[in-house]
Image: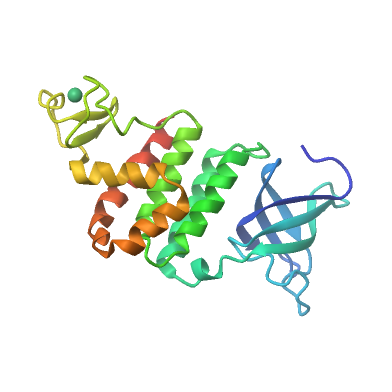
Amino acid sequence: MLRQGLMAASGVVLARARTGESGLWLTLFLRGEGVLRATAPGAESGHVRFGGGTEPFVWGTFQLHRGRAGGLCLSGVDIADDMLSLRKRPEALYTAVRWSRLVKRFLPFEYPADVLLANLYWNMRLLSVPAVPPAAAAWRFLWRWLEDWGLAPDLAHCSRCGGAPEGAEWTEEGLLCSHCVRDRQGARPSFSGAELTLLRQVAERDGEAVAHLFEKNESFIKYEAAFALAARCAEGLLYEK
Ligand SMILES: [Zn+2]
């Protein structure tokens, strides 16, 4: 929790909005602090006070102080990573906006969540790699978030019989193999064996290895729809928790 006076913490700008008097409201996600709001006085006026440090998805060290009214004010930013290649690609930018909305929605205010913050950083880096479909980065970000919160489904075993599934359906009781799913009603998101294998690789490997995987296998773009479907399933678990 923040106290009086100056503080500095590393993190990211999740969102920003204009305030009346040529200033900005920023939503920051900071190490050791969690999500908080701060004003950036004068950021919109003629002089470039924060040098691009108030742009959404810019990572850096943010210096803050308590204003007279008790709210947090930004006094400086040291930019560490401007994520320019992400911010220049509309599809990647759109994905990052979705992530930032999910963090704002599901993470309580001023609740430190450094594992989620690191997860966000490394998957924004992955989102910056042109060979990686944004849906694959989204799946990876969301699955690792679920894993951190103890909500991630087992991708290697059927949740009913424990067998290694060839293909599987995503159900409210976890992934079910085709044998176990036979008696159940209704269509559910389903994944082939090849899709499951790739979903696991992307979820579990480190970011550099995942980037390498897509750079070496251009045909993996055909799995984009499967990643998008899996990301929607994972996002659904956040809403159900
Ligand atoms: Zn089974």
- Residue at 31 percent across and 34 percent down: it is 155
Question: Residue lying furthest bottom in this view?
Answer: 46
Q: What's the coloring here?
A: rainbow
The part of the image, by quadrant, that contains residue 134 is bottom left
- Along the line of sight, which residue is nearer the eye, 28 or 19? 28
Tell me, yes or no, if residue 18 can be seen here.
Answer: no
Q: Tell which of 109 and 170 is nearer to you.
A: 170
Q: Is residue 122 left or right of residue 182?
A: right
Quadrant where ligand 1 appears: top left
Q: Nearer the viewer, residue 174 or 104?
A: 174
Q: Position of residue 93 (x, y in %)?
A: 47, 64
Residue 1 falls left or right of residue 127:
right
**Where is residue 104 drawn, in percent x and y?**
56, 46
What residue appears at the point 43 percent right and 43 percent down from the top-left corner?
142
Q: Nearer the viewer, residue 111 or 86?
A: 86
Give how far across and how far down residue 196 sits, in percent.
25, 41
The quadrant the C terminus occupies is: top left
Residue at horizontal 42 percent and vertical 45 percent from the top: 205
Q: Say above or below: 149 vs 126.
A: above
Residue 148 visible in the shown view: yes
